[in-house]
């Protein structure tokens, strides 16, 4: 388990580093060659994050199966560590990707809604419906991840 703790610590460091880079990007961009510095930092950040995720996935799926001689029933498969790790990974993937998609959708519809409301204030109700539909994507991903977690536990 020491490797997982190291990987988790490195992932937390990369996430904190990317957040601070985003916060400080305005100050960095005002410097000479600031935009190229930000691009290089983000490329390095994404490369390190991708490598750490690859190592984490390999570590999760390479756990030896101790129930090889047991009958392959639903309970045995659910208690198998490799299937348990795969279930946790798929639940996290469903939640994470759906929230990223919802964020992109809300950014697009929210900015369009603000532009429409600034021209005609009677469009407020209609535009809120579209923004709410975009937020529903994250709720669907959360429901799917809850269903996956109920299957593996």
Image: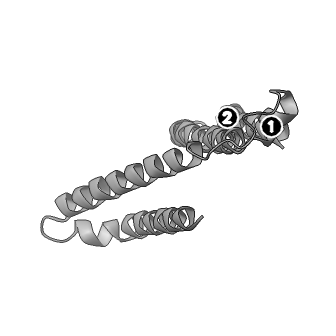
Q: Nearer the viewer, residue 76 or 122?
A: 76
Closer to the camera: disc 2 or disc 1? 1
Image position, residue 106 (x, y; %):
58, 40
Can residue 116 be seen?
no
Q: Quick one: label 1, few (<14), some, or many (20+) residues within 10 Å? A: some
Q: Quick one: label 2, few (<14), some, or many (20+) residues within 10 Å? A: many
User: How many marks overall?
Assistant: 2
Q: Quadrant of residue 68?
A: top right
- In this image, 96 relative to 78: left or right? left
Image position, residue 48 (x, y; %):
35, 56
Image position, residue 26 (x, y; %):
32, 67
Q: Is residue 72 above or below residue 14?
A: above
Q: Nearer the viewer, residue 9 or 125?
A: 9
Q: Which mark is residue 31?
A: none
Q: Quadrant of residue 18?
A: bottom left
Q: Residue at x 80, y 42 (%)?
A: 79
Q: Which mark is residue 137?
A: 2
Q: Residue at x 56, y 61 (%)?
A: 4
Q: Nearer the viewer, residue 117 or 140?
A: 140
Q: Which residue is mark 1?
A: 78
Mark 2–mark 1 CB contact (< 8 Å): no
Q: Is residue 148 above or below residue 52?
A: above
Measured Cα–Cα span from mark 2 to mark 1: 28 Å
Sequence-wise first label, 2 or 1: 1
Quadrant position of the C terminus in the picture: top right
- In this image, 76 relative to 139: left or right? right
Can residue 31 be seen?
yes
- In this image, 90 relative to 6: left or right? right
Callout 1 secondary element: helix
Callout 2 secondary element: helix
């Amino acid at each position: 388990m020491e490797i997982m703790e190291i990987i988790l610590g490195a992932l937390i460091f990369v996430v904190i580093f990317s957040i601070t880079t985003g916060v400080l990007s305005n100050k960095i961009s005002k410097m000479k060659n600031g935009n190229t510095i930000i691009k290089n930092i983000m490329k390095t950040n994404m490369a390190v994050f991708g490598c750490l995720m690859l190592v984490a996935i390999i570590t999760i799926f390479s756990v030896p199966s101790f129930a090889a001689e047991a009958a392959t029933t639903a309970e045995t498969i659910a208690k198998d560590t490799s299937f348990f790790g795969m279930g946790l990974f798929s639940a996290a993937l469903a939640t994470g990707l759906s929230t990223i998609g919802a964020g992109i959708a809300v950014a697009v519809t929210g900015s369009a809604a603000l532009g429409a409301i600034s021209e005609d204030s009677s469009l407020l109700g209609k535009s809120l419906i579209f923004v709410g539909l975009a937020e529903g994507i994250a709720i669907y991903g959360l429901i799917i991840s809850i269903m996956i977690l109920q299957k593996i536990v």
